[in-house]
Image: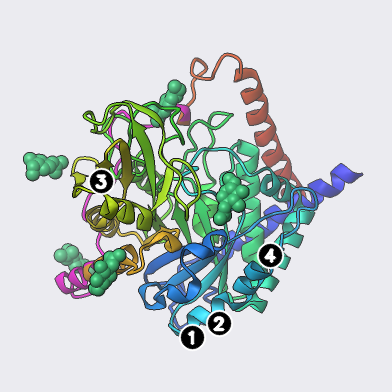
């Protein structure tokens, strides 16, 4: 009985998503049509404000004119009730209530979004470990619907213009299916004009997930979200586990697929339009203690994660502001090394080595994003910027400059994709096309079962729909 009810609800969910698919796969109506559910953003210069790190940069120190969209990050899912967890701390509760009105009073064009899911710890990276509370909420149609309704209601009551699905990150085929259902249902339930975005893994294919063959449902992603925020950072494991210095968010990497460019292009290849992709840039840095300060290049041996800083309060991580202060505090002038092959930069200060995105990296990454016709960028988190908001300002200026020069080159003002889009050779994920020999010996049986179960579920739901 219970299971047939669940199946029926799932069928309704799919029927929802199919009807939505029919509605939106028709040619796009003209922009002034009242049928258009969501006016498309023309560009996105976004920032995530980490509520837990509000003391690093109070809200009133932000310059709201540097962004088109600001995210409140984040409200979590309760692990047992699967409901939205409201901030218990009175300061955070008042931050949530004042976030939208305070920022919009400084920039009337600004849009704000409420991000739900684990806020994540800067530097904890793109490790594909699912958020169990989010996964449990998303697995059950009833809690999914209740959570979505509550989140939309809270967002609207607090003056937000949209909701961000920050499930970091679905890590199995079933969780990906749930992610697709959630996207379709929340889109169907959201009021017209309400923004719905998702913050997703750097690549469309999730590497190193417990089960192989985990791809996002790109068709649902493209159809249901206004755009997706690609987490193009956190590409190296935290701490001294990998015992050498490394870049955390390189644009290019010749030796592996762990690069921002690979991730962005994988999303485009998967069929999500570039104009729905927003590329993430980190405002946190990764740090290590060098084994030998005379050997301070990329790939140099390290002995431990770098020193904890007062503001960011975690070993191996620093805010952009803290990197600048540490560099300025030294007795000798330190120089930033820019690696033009990776598009990444680092400073080494005595035995402390820090990889971070400086102004040159930001400019080059944004040029890449513009060349590929992306909708924009997001900074994560904006409260890690320095007092002058140097990175936010550099990014905003560079993006606007790119837009001006691309529209002056082209009378239509349309952004052009100038380069053929393809993945670096030989770096495609072997797991994306798993042959029998590629599944890990111990996990292959369970992988087969999950894949079959998933296919079976989909087939079952389709049959139900056809019969109805
Ligand atoms: C990090 O180290 C682990 C274990 O030594 C290895 O399996 C993994 O490939 C390394 N990751 C990177 C990005 O180098
Ligand atoms: C820093 O982190 C520790 C736990 O790692 C926590 O107990 C402490 O309250 C944090 N300090 C601040 C100022 O947030
Ligand atoms: C990096 O800069 C060096 C020296 O300016 C130049 O020779 C090299 O071609 C550049 N590499 C890339 C990938 O742009
Ligand atoms: C901020 O800008 C002021 C004036 O332009 C300058 O004097 C100061 O050094 C800057 N501070 C930082 C942290 O960049
Ligand atoms: C400008 O747009 C037109 C079509 O709208 C295209 O044919 C032309 O190549 C574009 N020019 C540039 C410089 O991108």
Tag 1, which secondary structure? loop
Q: Is mark 3 within 8 Å of ligand 3?
A: no
Range of the magenta residues?
Answer: 402-431
Judging depth in this view, the residue of 399 and 331 nearest the camera is 331
Q: Is mark 2 within 8 Å of ligand 2?
A: no
| Precedes in sequence: disc 3 or disc 2 | 2
Q: CA distance from mark 3 to mark 1?
A: 36 Å
Q: CA distance from mark 1 to mark 4?
A: 25 Å
Q: Are marks 4 and 3 in contact (CB under 8 Å)?
A: no
Q: CA distance from mark 4 to mark 2?
A: 20 Å
Q: Name the spot of residue 388 as percent of width and height, x first.
A: 32, 69
Q: Disc 4 vs disc 3: which is toward the camera? A: 4
| Precedes in sequence: disc 4 or disc 2 | 4
Q: Name the spot of residue 213 as percent of width and height, x first.
A: 53, 31
Question: Relative to 373, is 341 on the left or the right?
Answer: left
Disc assigned to residue 89: 4
Q: Disc 1 vs disc 4: which is toward the camera? A: 4
Question: Relative to 163, is 185 on the left or the right?
Answer: right
Disc assigned to residue 101: 2
Q: Are marks 1 and 2 in contact (CB under 8 Å)?
A: yes
Quadrant position of ligand 3: top left
Residue named by callout 1: 105
Residue named by callout 3: 345
Dominant secondary structure of the magenta stretch?
A: loop
């Amino acid at each position: 009985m219970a299971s047939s009810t669940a199946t029926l609800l799932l069928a309704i969910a799919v029927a929802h998503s199919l009807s939505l698919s029919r509605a939106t796969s028709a040619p796009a109506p003209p922009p002034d049509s009242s049928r258009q559910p969501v006016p498309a953003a023309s560009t996105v210069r976004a920032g995530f404000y980490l509520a837990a790190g509000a003391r690093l940069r109070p809200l009133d120190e932000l310059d709201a004119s540097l962004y088109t969209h600001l995210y409140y990050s984040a409200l979590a899912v309760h692990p047992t009730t699967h409901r939205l967890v409201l901030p218990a701390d009175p300061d955070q509760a008042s931050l949530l209530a004042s976030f939208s009105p305070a920022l919009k009073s400084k920039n009337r064009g600004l849009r704000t979004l409420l991000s739900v899911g684990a806020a994540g710890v800067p530097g904890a990276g793109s490790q594909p470990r699912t958020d169990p509370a989010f996964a449990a909420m998303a697995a059950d149609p009833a809690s999914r619907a209740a959570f979505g309704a509550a989140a939309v209601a809270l967002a609207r009551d607090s003056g937000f213009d949209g909701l961000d699905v920050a499930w970091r990150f679905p890590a199995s085929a079933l969780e990906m299916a749930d992610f697709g259902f959630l996207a379709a249902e929340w889109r169907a339930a959201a009021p017209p004009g309400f923004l719905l975005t998702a913050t997703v893994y750097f690549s469309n294919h999730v590497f190193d997930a417990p089960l192989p063959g985990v791809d996002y449902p790109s068709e649902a992603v493209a159809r249901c979200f206004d755009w997706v925020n690609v987490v193009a950072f956190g590409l190296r494991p935290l701490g001294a586990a990998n015992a050498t210095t490394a870049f955390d968010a390189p644009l290019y990497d010749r030796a592996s697929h762990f690069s921002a460019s690979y991730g962005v292009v994988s999303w485009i290849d998967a069929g999500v339009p570039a104009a729905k992709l927003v590329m993430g840039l980190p405002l946190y840095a990764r740090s290590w203690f060098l084994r030998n300060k005379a050997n301070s290049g990329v790939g140099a041996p390290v002995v431990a994660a770098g020193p904890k800083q007062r503001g960011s309060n975690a070993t191996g991580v620093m805010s952009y502001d803290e990197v600048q202060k540490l560099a300025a505090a030294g007795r000798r002038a330190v120089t930033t090394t820019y690696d033009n092959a990776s598009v990444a930069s680092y400073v080494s200060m005595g035995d402390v080595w820090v990889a971070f995105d400086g102004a040159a990296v930001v400019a080059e990454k944004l040029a890449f994003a513009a060349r590929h016709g992306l909708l924009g960028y997001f900074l994560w988190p904006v409260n890690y910027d320095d007092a002058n908001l140097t990175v936010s300002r550099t990014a905003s200026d560079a993006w606007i400059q790119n837009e001006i020069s691309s529209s002056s080159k082209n009378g239509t003002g349309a952004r052009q994709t100038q380069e053929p889009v393809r993945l670096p050779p030989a770096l495609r994920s072997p797991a994306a096309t798993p042959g029998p020999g590629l599944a890990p010996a111990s996990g292959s049986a369970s992988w087969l079962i999950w894949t079959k179960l998933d296919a079976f579920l989909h087939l079952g739901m389709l049959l139900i729909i056809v019969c109805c």
